[in-house]
Image: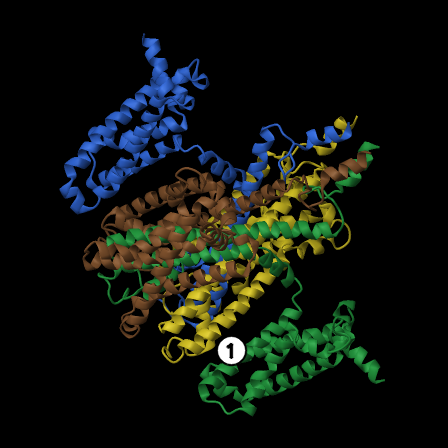
Chain colours: A brown, B green, C yellow, D blue
Amino acid sequence: MYEKIKYRVYDILVETDDGELIDRIVAVFLMLLILINAVAVVLETVDEYSAAYGSLFHAIEIVSVTIFTVEYLLRLWVAPLNPQYAGRFGRLRYAFSLMALIDLLAILPTFLPMIFTMDLRILRFIRTFRLFRLFKLSRYVESLDKVDDVIVSKKEELLVTLVMISMLLLFSSSLMYLVENEAQADKFPHIPAAMWWGVATLTTVGYGDIFPITPLGKILGAFIALLGIGMFALPAGILASGFAEELSKRRRKDGECCCPNCGCDLSADFEKKTK
Amino acid sequence: MYEKIKYRVYDILVETDDGELIDRIVAVFLMLLILINAVAVVLETVDEYSAAYGSLFHAIEIVSVTIFTVEYLLRLWVAPLNPQYAGRFGRLRYAFSLMALIDLLAILPTFLPMIFTMDLRILRFIRTFRLFRLFKLSRYVESLDKVDDVIVSKKEELLVTLVMISMLLLFSSSLMYLVENEAQADKFPHIPAAMWWGVATLTTVGYGDIFPITPLGKILGAFIALLGIGMFALPAGILASGFAEELSKRRRKDGECCCPNCGCDLSADFEKKTK
Amino acid sequence: MYEKIKYRVYDILVETDDGELIDRIVAVFLMLLILINAVAVVLETVDEYSAAYGSLFHAIEIVSVTIFTVEYLLRLWVAPLNPQYAGRFGRLRYAFSLMALIDLLAILPTFLPMIFTMDLRILRFIRTFRLFRLFKLSRYVESLDKVDDVIVSKKEELLVTLVMISMLLLFSSSLMYLVENEAQADKFPHIPAAMWWGVATLTTVGYGDIFPITPLGKILGAFIALLGIGMFALPAGILASGFAEELSKRRRKDGECCCPNCGCDLSADFEKKTK
Amino acid sequence: MYEKIKYRVYDILVETDDGELIDRIVAVFLMLLILINAVAVVLETVDEYSAAYGSLFHAIEIVSVTIFTVEYLLRLWVAPLNPQYAGRFGRLRYAFSLMALIDLLAILPTFLPMIFTMDLRILRFIRTFRLFRLFKLSRYVESLDKVDDVIVSKKEELLVTLVMISMLLLFSSSLMYLVENEAQADKFPHIPAAMWWGVATLTTVGYGDIFPITPLGKILGAFIALLGIGMFALPAGILASGFAEELSKRRRKDGECCCPNCGCDLSADFEKKTK
C-alpha cells in the first residue's frame, strides 16, 4: 500500500510524459500557483494594493508555501524511484540537484524570517526573493533546452563578443571622459561616470541624462554609437549560425544522412542509383 | 443567367489568379479604398482636419461602408462556388472563416452605433476600430504567408525567448526596485513602476523619464542593459535559421534533391557519373 | 589621332579593370574630389566656416563643377565605344542610364541658379542637393552590388515586413491615442501625434519627448515596445538567409557542384570513387 | 645553464600549450595583473578614491610596470627560440610584431613622463592610455581569432554597409536640416548639428536632446528612424552568413568531405555503397 502510493505520487509529479489527465491537472495547477505567486509579489509592493488586499496576499502566501513545501517533501520522498537517483545517497544526490535546490529556495524566503530576526531592509529583500519561485516553471518549459543548448554551444564566441564589448566600453568611455571632462565636469567627473554614458550609448538605450556637448565629444560619440551597432550584429550572427547547427545535429540523431536542402535520404538515393 | 452572373462575380472577386484585367481593376480599387479609409480614420482625429473636411470624411465613410457591405454580401453569396465551402452549411462555414469575419468586423463599426445608443467614449473607440479594415489587405499580400510560416514554424523557440525575456524583466525590475526605492521613492515606488523602467531599458527604448541614480543602481542597470542585447540577438538568430529552413522546404516541394550550393540536380548528376 | 584620343579617354575613364596606373590615379582623384565636395557642402552650412572660408568653398565649387562637367561630357563622348551603347541612339541611351543621370544631377545644382531666378529657400535646397554628388561614388564601390543583390532578392519578404511594421505602428498608435488622449491631451491630441510616439517606440529610438503616463498606457506601451523587438529580428533573419543564398549562387556560377561544407568538388570525388 | 634558463623562460611565457602548471600560474597571474591595472586606472579618476587610496594606486603602478617591463624584456630575449623569429634580425622582427608593440605601448605611458616634461592635460591623457594594457589580454583569448576571422572575411560587405549608412546619415541629416532649420534654428543651425541628430536616430540611441518638432520634420524623422532598422539588420545578416561559412571552412581543414546536416563522412559512405 505504502509503495503503491509512492509509485502513484512519482507517476503524477515526475513521470508526466504518459499524458494522464491527473498529471496534467497537477502540472497546470502548480504552474498557475507559481504565476499567481509572482503577480502577488509584484503587486504587494504597491502600497494601495497591499493596504486593500493585504490579507489576500497573506492567504496566497500561506497556501502557496504549504503546497510548495508538500511538493518539495513529496519529490524528495519519491526521488529514489528515479533510476538516476536510485541506490546509496540517492535522495541526498537529488536534494543537491538543480531543480531540487530551486524548489528549496522557493520556500526558504518564508521560513527564514521565522527562524532569524531580521531588519526591515533584508526582510524586504527576502520577500522579493520569492520571485525565485518562477524558476520552478523551467520544469514545464520543454523547448527551453533547445534555446539553452544553442547558447551553451556558442558560449565561447559569445564570451569573446562580451570581451570585445567590455573593451570597447572601457576605451570609448575613457576617451569621452578625457574629451568632455572639462566642459561638463558635473556629468563626466570620472571614468565610471563616463562608463554609464558608454553603456547607455553602446546598448542604444540613450536615456538622455548624459551626453557629449562639445563638438569633439559629439564626433567621438557618433563613431562610438555607430560601432555600437556591431554589438547587436555580432551576437545575432553567432546565434543564427548556432541555431542552424543545432537543427543539423538533431537530424543527425535521427540517424539519417539527408540532403540539407530537400531532406530526402541521400544514402538511400545513392543505393538505388548505384545498383 | 442568374448562375452566369454568380460565376462571373466569383471569378472577379475570388478567382483572381487568371490575370484578367477586370480582376486586377477591382482588386486595386478595393485596396485603394481600404488605404483611403485608414488615412481618413487617422486624419479625422485631428481637430483642424475634422472641422475643415468633416463632410468629406463622412462621404468617404458612407461610400466605403456601402461598397464593403456589398462586397461582403457578394462574397457570401458566391462562397459555395469555392469547392472548400461547397455542400451543406457551406455558406455558414464561410461566414465563420477568418477572412469573412474580418470583412464583417470591417463594416460593423458603422452599423453598431445605428442600432445601440452609446456614450461618446465608446463611440470614439468604435470609430477608431474602423482601422481594422486594413486587415482586409492581407487577402492581397501574397508573401505574407512566407513570413507567417517562418514565425509559426519557430513559434516554440520564440515563445521560449519571450519567457526568458519576461523572467529577465521581472528579476531585473525587482532588483532595481530594491536598490533604487530609497533614493528615488517617487520614480521607483513599487515593482510595477520599476518594470516600466525595465521594459524601456531591455528594449533599449530609453525614454529617459526614469533611470537609476545611485552608483549600485547604475552598475546593475548597466549589466541589465547589456543583457538586453541578447533580447534582439535571440529572436534574430531564431528567425534567420527559420527563413533558411523555409527555403529548403520550398525547394523540396519542387521534387528536386538538389545540391545546396549550386542548385543543380545531384541525383541526375550521380546517375550520369555511375553509368 | 582623334580616334586614338577617344579610345585612350575611354580606357582611362570607363575600362578601369586593366589596372593601369593612370586609371587608378584618375579614379582616386575623382573620388577625393567627390568626398571634398561633400565635406564642403556640410561645412558651408556652419556660419563661422562659411564666413571664414567662404572663398575657399567657392573655389572648390568652381573647380569641382568644371571637372565634373568635363567628366560628364567626356563620358558622353566615348559612350558609343562601350558595346552596350554602340549603334543608333547609343549616346542618347547612355545619357538616360542611371550613372549618366547621376553625373548630370551632380552638376545641375550649380547651373540651375544661373538660368532661373530663385528665392533663397529653394536656392538653399538646391545648394544642399549638391550632396547628390556622393552617388557618383557608387561607380567605384564594387561590393555594393553584392549587398544590393541580396536586398533585391529578398525585396518581397522585406516588403511584407514593412507592411507588418506599418500595421503594427498604426494599430498601436491608435490604441495609445485612445488610452492616453484624456490624460495627456497636449501630447496625444490625435492619432498622427500618437504615431510619432509609435515610431520612436517601435524603432527603440525613444527620444523621451512623448510617452504614456497612465498605468494602462504604460502596460500597453510595454507590450508594444516588446513587439518592436521583432521589427529588428525579422529583417535581420531575412537578410541573413539572403546572404547565405547569394553565396551559393556565386559558387554555382563558378560551374562547380561542390560540397556545401568543405567546398571540395563532389562530382570529381564521386567520379574517383565510382571508377 | 644560460641556454637552459632561456629555454625554460620561453617554455613558460610563449609555449603555453603543453599545459604545465607553472605556465598556467604565470598566465593567470599576468591576466589578473592586467585586470587590476584596468580597474585601478578607472577608479583613480574618481577624486575620493584617488585621495583615499592614492598610495595603493601608486604601488600597483610601480609593481605592474616593473613586471610588465621584465616580461617585455624576457619575451624579447627568448624571441629567437620561436622558429618564426629565428635567424637574422629575428629579435628586431619580433620587436615590430603586433603583440610586442602592444607590450611596449603598455609600459611606455609610465616611462614617457620621466623623460619628457609634459603639461597636466597630456599627462592625464597618457595616464588614461595605460588602459591600453588590456590589449595584452588578447594573447590569452583564443576564440578571439574565430570572431576576428569572420569579421575580416566579411570586411568588404561590412564596409559597403558602412558606406550605405554614411550616405543615409548624410542625406537624412541634410534633409532634416533643410526642414527644421527655420523652426529650431538653435537645434538645427547647420548640417553637422543635424548629423548629431541623424546618428542618434539611425543608431536608435535617441538621447532626446534634439528631435524634429514640425509636422514635416516628424514625418521625415519617422521614415529615417524606420530606415535605421536596416542598419542593424544588414550587418547582422552579413555576420550570420560569415559565421556559417567559417564553420564550413574549419571542417574542411579537418580533411573530411562531410554531409552538412549529419556530419557523417559522405565519401566513406559512397565508397561503401558503390563497392
Amino acid type indicated by mark 1: Val
Q: Is residue D101 above or below residue D3?
A: below
Near-viewer residue (B74 or D40):
B74
Q: Is residue C175 visible?
A: yes
Question: What percent of the width, then of the height, locates residue B56?
Answer: 56, 87
In which quarter of the view is residue A272 placed?
top right
Near-viewer residue (A165 or A93):
A93
Question: What percent of the width, then of the height, locates residue C170?
Answer: 51, 71
Question: What percent of the width, then of the height, locates residue B82?
Answer: 76, 73
Q: Is residue D121 left or right of residue B262?
A: left
Q: State the residue at coordinates (60%, 31%).
A: D252
Q: Which quadrant of the figure contains the C terminus of chain D?
A: top right
Q: Which quadrant of the figure contains the N terminus of chain D?
A: top left
In which quarter of the view is residue A200 placed?
bottom left
For label 1, the residue is B42
Question: What percent of the width, then of the height, locates residue C89?
Answer: 75, 55
Near-viewer residue (B206 or B114):
B114
Q: Is residue B132 left or right of residue B6?
A: left
Q: Is residue A80 left or right of residue A221?
A: right
Q: State the residue at coordinates (31%, 23%).
A: D72
Label 1's element?
helix
Q: State the residue at coordinates (31%, 52%).
A: B220
Looking at the image, the residue that sits furthest to the top is D1
* Chain under disc 1: B
Mark 1 burial class by Cα count in 10 Å: few <14, some 14-19, many 20+? many
Q: Is residue C70 visible?
A: no
Q: Is residue B122 above or below residue D124?
A: below
Q: How many marks?
A: 1
Q: Is residue C82 left or right of residue A274?
A: left
